[in-house]
Structures are given as structure tokens and as C-alpha cells.
Image (spheres, grey):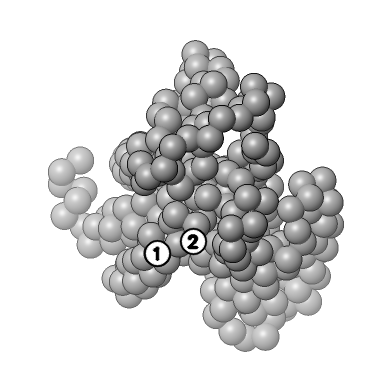
Amino acid sequence: MLGLLSYPFIQNAFLAGTCIAIVAAVTGYFLLLRGLTFAGHALPNIGFAGAAGAVLLGLDPIFGLLVFTIGAAVGIGLLGRDLRERDLAIGILMTFALALGLLFLSLYSGYAERVYSILFGTILGISHLDVLLSLGVSLLILLSILALFRPLLFSSYDPEVAEARGVPVRLLSIAFLILVALTIAIAVQIVGALLVFTLLVGPAATAGRLALRPWAVILLAIVLGLLYTWLGLLLAVLSGTIPVSFFIAFLSFSVYLPVRLLAPGRQRRRRPAGPAWAAASGEGRPQPVSSRASNDIPERSIRP
């Protein structure tokens, strides 16, 4: 295994995988907290249509992927907070985008190899330039989330109270979804559009069952994401035929399942009772809530 690390393409894969695993774990935590897991599933599929359209126009698929995912992210952010209506609109938008992707591929006369690589990922074939790009975009996303951390956390737990206190909830939602779109754009080179959902949701979902405080959940999610990515890469290289995305998804499921069975409902019982900004920063005193509100999912607001 140590000998494998001497190859440049293996080093590139590990460096890019490390960057993407970290940023996917951080954005995945807020994705779960805000009840946007379906949006996280839909954006990579919508991005596939953009990649196919870019190939049809003779452009780099990554540009089409970015345009479609960011455009869809803005649209989802404008759909409002009603969960049922939002998920319905996301589902219709995703199916329409997939139909467009199939149309673009059928109109393309050549072999769209780069489009199919976006579907399944090509981490073992990325270049040093791709590593630098992944590093730069990852730093941009992490710095943006760090700058928005407290208002983003507050609006994730209690959007109505946050809006009443002057927090721009709708603008924060759009900004966060744009960051998710950027995360997806750089993560598809590892697991592909079909399985990018694994890195976004798997580590954060498992960490949320094992830790309470936001920073503890995020750090644990990062550790789990790195382990899944590193082990997945090693196993894929040693197998020679099985793709990295399978091992990452398998490891994520294998860890989440026993944690889910052994710690059912842990998140709800130990969820912070007060505003999220107080739980994160240690400022202020937790506000009392009713027993019914304390068992609610983070998507719904807690009324005093």
C-alpha cells in the first residue's frame, strides 16, 4: 500500500479526495439540518443534464454542470419553506432535467466519454490541475460557511424566529444551496453524480447519531468522510476493477446501519432546546420549549 502512494495519480486522488470529503461533510451537516436531503439528491442529476448540454455545444461538461446546478440551487432556494410543495417542485424539476440530459445525449453524434465520467466519477484519472482546482473551491466553500456559520445555524433550527430577529433567511437559503452546488460540482470527479449523495449525507447522518453539539457533529462527519474516501481509494486500487464510488457507498452504509439501529432517535432526544446560535457559541440561555416541539425535526420551527 505504501508503494502505491509513490504514483502521482494516486497522490492526486488522495489529495482531491481529502479536500472533497471535508467540504462534503460540512455542507452535508447543514443539508440534513435544513431538511434538504432531497435537494442534495436532485442537484447532481440536474447537473448531469447541464454536462450533456455542454458536450452537445462543444464545451467542457463542467461548465454545463455548474450552470445547471447553480441555477437549480437558486430556484430551490426561492421555493419557500413549505416542505411538501418544495419537494414536489424539486421532483418535477429533476425529472425534466434528466429528460433533457437524455435528449442532449441522443442528439450528440460522438461518444460523450466525459459526460459518462461525470455520472460515475474518475478520481484515479484526475490531474494536478484538478487537485488545485478542488483545493481552491473547497477553501472558498469552507470560508463562506465559516463566515455564515452562526446565522446559518440559527435559521436552520428556527427560521421564523431568525427572520423576526432580522436574519435574511431566504437569502441565506439561496447562498447555502449555491455552496452545495459548488460542492457537488467538485465532488462528482470522485463518486460521480449518481453517488455524490453518499459523501454529502452518509458521514453527517452517522455523526448526527453519535454527537450532540454542532461542532462535534461536523468534526466527526469530517473524520468519517475522510475514512470512507481513503479506504475506498485503497480498496479500489487494490481490487483493480471495482470503482471507488462503490467502496465509499458500501463503507458509508456499513457504518450508518449499525449506528442507526443501536442509537434510534438519539438526535431528537438530545437536540439543543434553545436557539442554535446559543448552543453553538455558548452565549445566552436556552429557551424552554414544549415537549412536542423538542421532538420535532430541525426543519420545523420551535415556537416559544
Q: Which residue is mark 2?
A: 183
Q: Please name whichever residue, 230 or 286, is drawn nearer the observer in this view of the structure.
A: 286
Q: Is residue 226 above or below residue 134?
A: above
On the image, the x and y values in percent for residue 117 come to: 54, 62
Of residue 299 and residue 283, the one placed in the foreground of this image is 283
The structure residue drawn at horizontal position 67% and vertical position 38%, both measured from the top left corner, is: 303
Label 1 crowd bin: few (<14), some (14–19), many (20+), radius 10 Å: few
For the point 49% across and 61% down, the residue is: 183
Query: Residue 98, can we see it?
Result: no
Question: Residue placed farthest to the bottom in the image?
Answer: 58
Q: Is residue 22 left or right of residue 71?
A: left
Q: Position of residue 186 (x, y in %)?
A: 46, 64
Mark 1 sits on what residue? 147
User: As shown in the figure, which amino acid type bears the numbered disc 2?
Assistant: Thr
Task: Work out whether residue 151 can be spotted.
Answer: yes
* Image: 117 above or below 1: below
State the residue at coordinates (49%, 24%): 270
Q: Earlier in the sequence, mark 1 or mark 2?
A: 1
